Image (cartoon, rainbow, N blue to C red):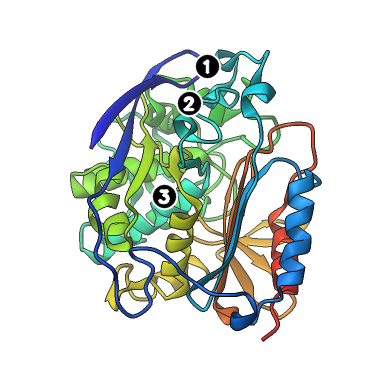
Amino acid sequence: MKRLWAFRNTLGVLLAGFLYTAPGLAQSEGGWPTAGWKHSTPADQGVDVTVLDALDRELASGKHGYVDGMLVVRNGYLVYEKSYSHDYQALFEGKDPKRWQYNYYDPDWHPYYKSGPLHTMQSVSKSVTSALVGIAIRRGEIPGTDVEASRYFDGFESTDGDPRWRAMKLRDLLTMTSGIAWDESTVPYTDPGNDCAVMEASEDWIRYVLGRPMATTPGERFVYNSGVTVMLAHILFKATGKHADEYAVEHLFGPLGIESFYWKKTPTGLVDTEGGLYLTARDLAKFGYLYLHDGVWEDKRILPEGWVASTTTPAVDVSESNDRKYGFQWWLLPYDTGSYAYTCLGYGGQILLVLPEHDLLAVFTGWNIYDKPSLSAAFALERILEAVRE
């Protein structure tokens, strides 16, 4: 493991990252993609290649913005994979990366880390963090989702003694129903009025989150809040004695055969679980495959029994005008059979779709932060479903 340092936020705060590369892995048995995906033709797995080819042409033309890659897995086989090249150096020219939170216009950071194979995951990091929480529960290091969150924050001043703070459960953090006053949805991430941007420009992200007042009773209302996922990073560390990146190597990425990743850290050394993870598209597909198989990998249970069901059962409505739901740091997109696609979403066009009833998953990566139409998860889901033939 190698510890790397880089300036990353608007104030140029020095942050640590975690770049991991594992030793070689033996070929797995039973069709698990631990050491790599098996390949098949789309037709052999009941997928219409003409539909995917049509989508490929659209993505290559730029019709849906800057998409970097697409892959589709059916019945455990990689049946379709495309990548698209964009001159991000030229696109970033004239934009000062220090003016933008998260260095969005710095080609050393986005969309690929140091121009290598690792792609920014943005808020897909949240879904991975949820899995780590589940693993810690399975291992007995966290009692369960009904544990009071406040027990892990002794020594921090928070919310002016509001009794609603003490009522907050781990479940409320997982479902974004913490009750903490927060706004990262009504203004752009580059706006200083955005709570997420202010948190990321601060010296201590946890203190910023805990310093926000309570707005509602925990569990009552969904408010998208990247700060609560940072709270999960702190809880993982306090409960397990290991930071999320190290814990992932031992209990999640290692078993899945994810050989390399990069994970940013905050100024205090806490892992940036709300958006700092970098993976390859194929390794993100492995993460989806774990959920496609109820948290079991190589016939060994990784996630607690029932965790995938809890994660993908609609816990809260996102809004009155939107029929998508939210589970444990996963989005749930409905489609015409009455089912939900388990969905990880990240800023800029990071999409993981998991469809258990079709034994199918799809990954899209991109960097749509420009004035162009971008690929939506609902559109991607619709087009992928069009390709399913049996």
Q: Are the residues at dot 1 and dot 2 in contact (C-beta closer than 8 Å)?
A: yes
Disc with the residue nearer the chain's start (1 vs 3): 1
Asked which secondary structure carries label 2, the reply is helix
- Cα–Cα span, label 1 and label 2: 8 Å
Residue drawn at x 41%, y 75% is 294
| Lateral position of residue 151 relative to residue 264, left or right | left
Residue drawn at x 73%, y 50% is 375
Residue drawn at x 73%, y 57% is 56
Circle 1 residue: 10
Residue situated furthest left in the rendering: 241
As displayed, is residue 140 above or below residue 246? below
Q: Are the residues at dot 1 and dot 3 in contact (C-beta closer than 8 Å)?
A: no
Kind of residue indicated by mark 1: Thr
The 10 Å Cα crowd at callout 1, few under 14, some 14 to 19, many 20 or more, is some
Closer to the camera, 390 or 239?
390
Residue 88 numbered mark, or none: none
Disc with the residue nearer the chain's start (1 vs 2): 1
Circle 2 residue: 200
Looking at the rendered image, the quarter that the C terminus falls into is bottom right
Kind of residue indicated by mark 3: Met
Circle 3 residue: 168
- Cα–Cα span, label 3 and label 2: 23 Å
